[in-house]
Amino acid sequence: MKRTSLLPWLLWICFVSTAWSQQPSINGPNDWSEFHRANMMRWNYYESVLNVKNVENLGVKWSMSLTRPVQSSPAVTGGVVYIGGEDQSVYALSAATGAILWSYPTGWNVFSSPAVMNGVVFVGSGGPDMDALDADTGVLLWSYTTGTTSFSSAPAVSNGVVYVGSGPPDPNVYALSASTGAKLWSYATQGYVQSSPAVANGVVYVGSSDGNLYALDAPTGAKLWSFQTGGGVYSSPAVANGVVYFGSYDNNVYALDARTGARKWVFQTGFFVTSSPAVADGTVYVGSYDNNLYALDARTGAQLWSSSLGGYVLSSPAVANGVVYAGAGYPSSNVYALNARTGDKLWTYATGLYVASSPSVVNGMVYIGSDDGNVYAFSLKNLRSYPGD
């Protein structure tokens, strides 16, 4: 019998293993790779570690000081947290330890929340530039300069295109090639666009300070319809089951038919609604400047419950496995976990200052920024080791 050396086989295994570990991360179903998540609902229905019964045992796994306020919301994919800060940088942090893997100086405060797709991080610089960075190294791949002086819209990436709104004084929504940064189209609203686009079924939904929610054809940018509210639309729309949900500066939450723009229902809160809704299991969760987090029936708009978070709710809620997570602003500084069905508070953590960043929930961990300058990661205290270790 001919004896065959195992060495070539072992070398091949080592090569494949090493090559695989160096590949850009492929977004998994449990990742929170952009502001809305890929489902445009801020709902992670793959979360299986945290639940209503154990979330009270959350504790700080790590915190990383970025020295200046963090209003950007984290994207989490491939074991890395991507986030911007008001220290004029974009960061990649280890999801398990918080260690800085790389940072990229933008020269502007970064309010935009990153989107990560196919090994590239897309983020507004805080100034006029929309940047694409290598997810592994932070090296700039391309940059597109808009007319804004203040980028806060978070990009959405779909089918090789980056969709993003531009802040004052530029009134445009842009579609850029994800691979090159070339402009594919732009659509001019009558006001600046701080709302973050949602992309579903070939349509881009986005709000403008002119008071409208727009539906644009994703390939061409042609307007399909618009819906006028009584105030600026800074809230980022969520899309679920053929309905678009969003808030307005006129104090209302709206539900529109995604195909026609016809109003299905409206719900009035006590103040501005700039928080972006999360939609899960037939319920819309959204915050208001009246200090409350609301749960509304997605079909009728009827209030199911409300819970005071002790400060204005600019933070957009996240939903995972029966729990709603959100932060609160002045005069609060807390991050909350609530029972999604009842609104009962299950867990609270006080950061050092207001929380405008929105949480991401991935693999048993909750990530969020705070105006105290820290990025926080929470995990169950009673685990022998934290998820991701």
Image (cartoon, grey):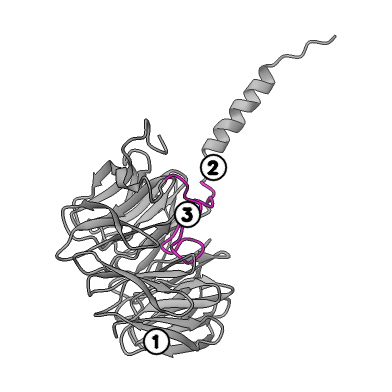
Q: Quadrant of the C terminus?
A: top left
Numbered disc in front, either 3 or 1? 1
On the image, numbered disc 3 is attached to which residue? 120
Q: Which mark is residue 212?
A: 1
Q: Report the front residue among 228 and 54.
A: 54
Label 1 secondary element = strand
On the image, numbered disc 2 is attached to which residue? 23
- Residue 89 visible from this viewpoint: no
Three-letter code, disc 3: Val
Are the residues at dot 2 and dot 1 in contact (C-beta closer than 8 Å)? no
Q: Report the front residue among 117 and 337.
A: 337
Label 2 secondary element = loop
At 40% from the left and 47% from the top, the residue drawn is 50
Three-letter code, disc 1: Asn
Chief SS of the magenta region: loop
Q: Is residue 231 above or below residue 202?
A: below
Numbered disc in front, either 2 or 1? 1
Measuring from the top left, give residue 3's x and y in whole percent. Answer: 78, 10
Separation (CA) of disc 2 from disc 1: 42 Å
Q: Residues within 10 Å of mark 1 (few under 14, many from 20)?
A: many
Q: Is residue 24 left or right of residue 104?
A: right
